Amino acid sequence: MQYMLLIYNSGDWQDLSPEQQQEIGGAYFAFTEELQAAGKMVAGDALQPTSTATSVRVRDGETLTTDGPFAETKEVLGGYYLIDVESLDEALAWAAKIPGAAYGTIEVRPVVTDYETVA
C-alpha cells in the first residue's frame, strides 16, 4: 500500500540559525537514506516557503489566483514522502521517525491506487 506522509510545521525555516538548519537538514538526509535503504521510498521532496505559493480557484467559470496558500493555520505543508509499505502500522512507524514529527505534525494518508475500493 502507498501512503503519503505530509509534513506540517511552523514554516519559519528562515528564522532558524544556520547551525539549526544544518542539524535539521542532516536529520532529514539520514531519515531519507534509511527509508531508501529499506526500499520503502517512492518519492519525497521539501516545498518552497508559502511565500512562493499561488492558490487557484475557479468560481462561476472565472479563474481566481491568490498569492500564498489559503489556510488559516499556524502549521504549513513543508514537504512530503510517498512510501510503499505493508500496512498502516508500518506507515505510522515511518511517520514517527520523520524529524519534523518532533516539532510539527505528520499527516498519514493512504493513496488511492484502486478506484474500485475507495473508502
Image: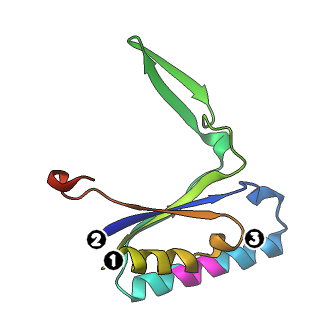
Q: Which residue is mark 1?
A: 87
Mark 2 crowdedness (10 Å alpha carbons): few <14, some 14-19, many ≥20: few
* Numbered badge on residue 1: 2
Neighbour tally class for label 1: few under 14, some 14-19, many 20 plus, Cα within 10 Å = few
User: CA separation, marks 1 and 3?
Assistant: 32 Å
As drawn, 30 above or below 60: below
Q: Are marks 2 and 1 in contact (CB under 8 Å)?
A: yes
Horizontal side of residue 112 vs 17, given as left or right: left
The spot of residue 60 in percent (x, y) is 40, 11
Residue at the extreme front:
119
Q: What residue does disc 3 label?
A: 21
Look at label 2 and name its amino acid. Answer: Met
Of the 4 image quadrants, the one containing the N terminus is bottom left
Q: What amino acid is labelled 1 in the image?
A: Ser
The numbered mark, 1 or 3, whose residue comes first in the sequence reads 3
Q: Secondary structure at mark 1?
A: loop
Mark 3 nearby-residue class (10 Å; few <14, some 14–19, many ≥20): some
Residue at 73% x, 48% y: name it: 74
Residue 75 in the magenta stretch? The answer is no
In the displayed structure, does residue 107 sit left or right of residue 17? Answer: left
Range drawn in magenta: 27-31
C-alpha separation, residue under disc 2 versus residue under disc 3: 33 Å
Q: Quadrant of residue 79?
A: bottom right
Q: Nearer the viewer, residue 53 or 93?
A: 93
- Callout 2: helix, strand or loop? loop
Q: Residue at x 73, y 55 (%)?
A: 10
Residue 119, image x and y in percent? 27, 53
Q: Mark 1 or mark 3: which is in front?
A: 1
